[in-house]
Image (spheres, coloured by chain):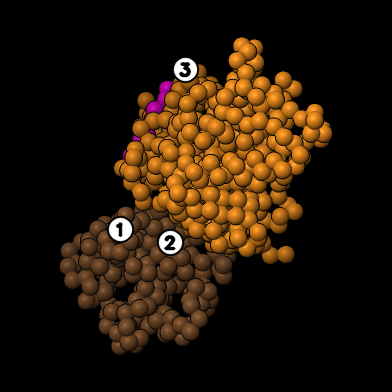
Chain colours: A orange, B brown
Amino acid sequence: MAQNIRLMQGNEAIAEGALLAGCNFMAGYPITPSSEVIEILSSRLVRIGGVCIQMEDEIAALGAVLGASLAGAKALTASSGPGISLKQEHIGYASMCEIPCVIINVMRGGPSTGLPTLPAQSDIMQARWGTHGDHAIIAITPSSVNESFYETIRAFNLALKYRTPVMILTDEIIGHMREKVVIPEKKDVEIIDTALPDIPPEEYKPYNFKSGKVTPLAPMGEGYRYHVTGLIHSETGFPSQKIDIIQDAQKWLYDKIYKNIKDIEKFEEFLTGDAEILVVAYGSTSRSARQAISMAREDGIKAGMFRPITIWPFPDEQVSRLAKRAKKILVPEMNMGQVILEVERNACGSYVRGLNVVNGEPITPDMIYASIKEISSL
Amino acid sequence: MNSRTEFRFAGSGGQGLILAGIILADAAISYENKNAVQTQSYGPEARGGSSKSEVIISDENIEYPKATRVDYMVALTQESFSKYAGDVKDDGVIIVDSELVSDHSKAKGKLYSLDLVKSAREGLGKLLGLNIIALGVLVELSGIVSHDSIEKALLKRVPKGFEDYNKKALEIGFELAGKIKK
């Protein structure tokens, strides 16, 4: 059978991926360059019995998503920098109450209103540390329209599996560009669905973190009654001030993500086998990096790329493994230097240089090639 | 990377240049089994300002999605011509409208000044469809996709009742390009 190929916009691919994953609820507030996500879902969801609400603001939008998720919906919100700033309070609530949700951030230049129609990668650290308090997060940085489609499906799976907010970080380039998407049959895609706990309601502990396993979140209305609060809580969901419970509860939010990093991490290596110069690039910038590496290889420079697809939790082990061999590392980013901080922590003494472009234009292959040339002669 | 061909539609918001780019990209991937990437850049305003729509077409994977060495460009405003002509290749082609672009001092490659607006006025009766005329010109000049493919991709996106109007616009573009190809 012929493959089902479609020309699709990045934001459209996110909407289509969400639908394939079984998303049946979206609440949002339109903002460039993410608006197409809510525009498309507003017409598509109602036709399949789902719900799409334009809320009064971005805070309320994530609030609605969390409510829907507690009731068993697969829920999503989409925004860009200014809206994501507003959502931080509820991201913390989702993290603390372990409510699955998918949050799309189509990054644009900032801070504040910044550059509404121009790309940036300057919300990487915000995704990790935007909300207060110790918490973990999963964040994914697709680099193409096709990947936006498939990674949105994976985001829904991870959100449910680990009961956590999952962020997709694209940017204005990926969000608005159109390219080929190979649409799969639903049966060929792994989809994790909402499930009832396998124990009766009277034995159900919604935050059973002492078990070391993520307890499924019982959808409200199914007879499983439990308490949900942003206060530190015990396994029952009720607030606790006992120091051993506090310690365990806080640690759990980290452990459930970091102890499962092998399941969550995803990355790509391009010509890293013999690479003496390692380029660490993600999202749209990785496309320029790949082209630059091919140019450098033609000159006989042994360059390669490590591309995190899951950017949080950061793939420390992978970067340090490659850094030991490479000796020189280049980190091109459309920000003042965010992922480079993580790379430096894992550089094992290798030389690390950033290439930082913050003028609203993408980093070109020529610019990365020039940097590779320069550090190759050091 | 040799098969990479870069197209740029430059003008102002509202001229339908993004749509022209989408149609070209769709023709390439849906009917010619090629790879294509379409991008755009515009300011915060909904109408006016300089905007551009770019399409890269290749038989291979396309990495960097924006145009850097433009093979074919069409410009429908003076401002966008002056702003975006700089990275056209030395052997590239720029098409400008004879009424809308008069200052050619920023020209690169081969520049042709064609009667796009005049042809729209005379052939279609109005300027709606100027983007499709421009599309027809670039398709004919480059030979990147067949007439049949571009027409199929165009008709997918045309509202009912306007099929013939748009086919006519495309034909006008082919003819205008045919004259300079000789």
A163 to the left or right of A118: right
Q: Which residues are magenta?
A: A351-358
Three-letter code for the amino acid on which mark 3 is drawn: Gly
- Would you place residue A38 above or below residue A279 in this image? below
Q: Which numbered disc flags the more N-terminal residue, 2 or 1?
A: 1
Q: What chain letter is assigned to the residue under label 1?
A: B
Of residues B35 and A310, which is closer to you in this image?
A310
* Residue type at tag 1: Glu
- Give the camera-side residue of B56 and A325: B56
Residue A271 - label: none
Marks 2 and 3, how far apart at CA: 42 Å
Q: Secondary structure at mark 1?
A: loop
Q: Please rate how many residues cluster around mark 2, counting C-alpha atoms within 10 Å: few if below 14, some from 14 to 19, many from 20.
A: many
Reply above or below: B116 against A337. Answer: below
- Local packing at callout 3 (Cα closer than 10 Å; few below 14, some 14-19, many 20+) is few
**Residue on which disc 3 sits:** A349
Q: CA distance from mark 2 to mark 1?
A: 22 Å
Dot label at residue B55: 2
User: Residue beneath label 1, please?
Assistant: B45
Question: What percent of the width, then of the height, locates residue A200?
Answer: 82, 34
Residue at 66% from the left image edge and 26% from the top image edge: A237
